[in-house]
Image: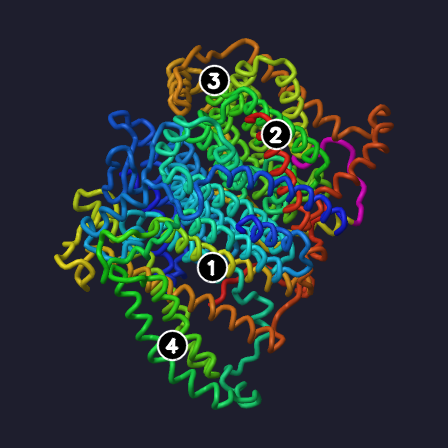
Amino acid sequence: MPSLPVVVPLIAAALLLAARPLATYRRTLDLVAVGTSGAVALILGFLIFRTDHSGSYWFAGFHPAHGIAVGIEFTIGPLNAGLACLGATGMTAVMVFSWRYFTQVGTYFHVLMLTFLAGMTGFCLAGDVFDMFVWFELMGVSAYALTAYRPEERGPVQGALNFAITNSVGAYLTLTGIALIYGRTGALNMAQIGAWVDRHPPSGLVTISFLLIITGLLVKSAIVPFHFWLADAHAVAPTPVCVLFSGVMVELGLYGIARMYWSVFGPGLGHRAAVGHVFLALGVLTAVVGALYCFRERHVKRLLAFSTISHAGVFLAGFALLSPLGLAGAALYVAGHAFVKGALFLGAGIVLHRLRSVNETWLHGRGRKLPVTGVLFTAAALGLADLPPFGTFLGKGWIDDAAEAPAVTLILLACTIVSAGSVLRVAGGVFYGLGDPPREDERMAAEANEETGETDTARQRTPLSMLAPLALLTVAGLAVGITAMDPHASDALLAAAAQFQGQPAVKPADVTVSSVVTGVASAGGAVAVGLAGLYWRRLPVLRSLYEPGARGLGLADRFQSGVINDYVTWAIAGLACLGGVLAAIIR
Amino acid sequence: MSQRQRLILFSVAMAGLAACFGWAASGLPGFGNYPGPYGPVILHDAVAQTRATGVVSAVNFDYRGFDTLGEEFILFTAAAGLSVVLRRLRGEREREPDREPETDNSNKPGTSAAVKVPALLFTGPTVLIGWWLASHAQANPSGGFQGGVTLASALALVYLAGEFIAFRRLSPVMLTDAVEAAGAGGFAVIGLIALAMGLPYLDNFVPLGTIPGSVSSGGTIPLISFFVGLEVAAAFTLIIGEFLEQTLLIRRGLWITSRSSWSPGSSPSACMGS
Amino acid sequence: MVAWILAVGLHGIVTSRDLIHQIICLVVVQSSTYVLLLGVGYVTGGVAPYFYDISQRAKAVDPVVQALTLTDIVVEAAVTALLLSFAVQAHKRFGTLDPHELVEFRG
């Protein structure tokens, strides 16, 4: 049973490829893809609530003897099965959305999506470091190919190259770390390596193996300074695919880091609090950088991508608190975020489908003819701003409760306000024509007609098969929050987080007044930022700030240079810094 | 960043990384002192448990067969991705003249007989070796990958002999796709059969045979190896074929530079190659 | 040794002005993992783990890393093929293979 979420999409992919002569029956393809991902989501949903079992599944029946694993293990807990289920649910929504989205789509799109799904679930469930790497690579290869799905345009080709090379470097460093730890422990099973690490004093080998293994995951989860590729790839990948990239793939990288820490290396690193602080700082830095880039972006998909970077920082901060409450908060936040971010990308997809552009400036006021999409997009943007009762507000509230540091709370709050405010600015400007009409400029005109190849020419109305997934994802974002407010659900989530970390759950997670207040304040602040972004020309204070701000933007451009060489250099520099800091702590 | 800045930053960072590496390596046992326990346990049990004398194959196709499944599908995905990325785009198709590629051969210099004859001579033995390699994983250092790559290189030899048309005839995309799907899917289905029999996924459900290393030994190992061979051969044939096709396309000047070359009225939508 | 191969490959990626060269440098980076994997599993005086015509009790090197390396090689082949196809398209779209000249995104 636990093998099915991986194997079923793989077999479906092979079947679809074999059945290419029948590819004219497009609906059959869609049905197979939707059915497969839906079935996978159901199986995973069943696995989350399965309590009769220890959660270990040994492939080919090679059970460990005397504590030595000879086969490959799947370790199924509520958290990782839940994350995989989130991926499969998102995939189902995306496949429904794609039903009428693409002009012409061959079998290959479905094949790649299904292998992507298999990679995600395999990565989540694997309890073996090398097996994790294999599924990580399958996910990566599918993602690279999906990014370059429209090779007739320049953007996708460059985005895919940046994505693939940066991530491959990270993945090979991960493999180097795996080889190093294997060379000492002679084990690939996570629990077994963890037991070995637990028995031995902290050492350079363990520390550096941990660092190298998480490098690939840091790149995938777009933590500063490993993040540069993300905006390039997300801006050009087909919009439905972005839903999964932003909503699930980035979070999978973070899950991998958490898994490596808690299941394998955590006990052996000593000085837990200090290590946690390093990752907390990294998370906060990522949140700030992502929010700032988000605010200055006018390309809607890129803007959403930067907001994902900002949120990835918040998630990392949640993990880095090293408490069950922080992890439970991050998990809940990931779920809430995945749904609303997915909804936002689908909204952007509908805009692209109907209006043939994703340039915020050009689109100003042109979205008025899409009222339903506008309402849903705005609702999802408010969800992104942690408005209660979206799942995001409670997740963020738990992270704040766990942090017990007002400074962290305030910075993360500011980041959410700025990044969600930028999205609200888009919503207000595009769908309601708020703010001053923009001046036409050259870059805008050039960008306005990008991306036209992805979807059909403008239709007269939005198909239901596109609106329904958008609405469902938005509602799901709400449902996550409402469910989590139920004490039973929140206790179960907290217990799952504690189980993941191998520690007892200490205090119950409540809906505190402060989290509701923070959520409302966050949403209010985001609306204010959004309005300020729309009406800044009328506010003299902001105008006077514009000049120095513009100079800063030039500097920002130089970092996000689009040159692979730079991205790899920054990644290596970040790795060396992180290595230095960890070495200083462990020694 | 300028090249200089990049180089400075890289050098500093790499020095730090090298120091980290040295620190880590100091914790490794000396070269040649692999401590185990994974390897020794496998070495001790493999022949008895799987009746395969090729222990690496036993690890690949039995103990860690699930890794290999993922790896097959990475290759499968890469081949599918390649077909997407290198498909004939609309502009490229429209520019294509109606005549068949065959007529093109007349004005190209033929391949020298010194290349042609040995290449064609070696094709047969290469196919044989590939087949043999793919079907003896349980016995010796061979297996599906080695065999599959060798099989694909046999087809590359056909191309080398200047017979691109023959290469395409021998490996039409439809067929390679089907073989690829059969190889990768077959592997996954073998695992599923075990599941249907109430065993764990990929369990070795075929009788193991009595003589270690013989053709009938190893249970599912030779079976999986065979499917892997199919998959690898088809994937590499597909990859080679796609790149060769691109070479032809570029040589004939049929490619388009960017979307600006589209006429404004036409819908520049992506088309799948046939 | 492994660190050197890794450093050479990374240096190549960082300084490269040609995508094909850059991709090959990526292959060099990955090659360092083969050497490392095979290196950590080596046993002095061990034979290859194939017992077709030798005793099963002979001292042998670790078979697991060899299997991992095989997997690693296939991954490399797949990724490289895909990357090269991107490079082909990049050359068609941008008319150059210099990563510094691929200018669709700046900022």
Label 1 Cα crowd, 10 Å radius (few <14 / some 14-19 / many 20+): some
State the CA–CA distance, disc 1 to disc 4. 23 Å
User: What residue does disc 3 label?
Assistant: A325
Between A293 and A107, the one nearer to me in the picture:
A293
State the CA–CA distance, disc 2 to disc 1. 35 Å
Residue at 33%, 51% (x, y): give it: C63
Is B3 in the magenta?
A: no
* Residue type at the position of mark 3: Leu
State the CA–CA distance, disc 2 to disc 4. 58 Å
Image depth: mark 4 or mark 3 in front: 3
* Residue type at the position of mark 2: Val
User: What residue does disc 2 label?
Assistant: A581
Q: Does mark 4 fall on the same chain as mark 1?
A: no
First along the sequence among labels 2 and 3: 3
Helix, strand, or loop for circle 1?
Answer: helix
Pinpoint the chain carrying mark 2. A
Label 2 Cα crowd, 10 Å radius (few <14 / some 14-19 / many 20+): some
* Residue type at the position of mark 4: Leu
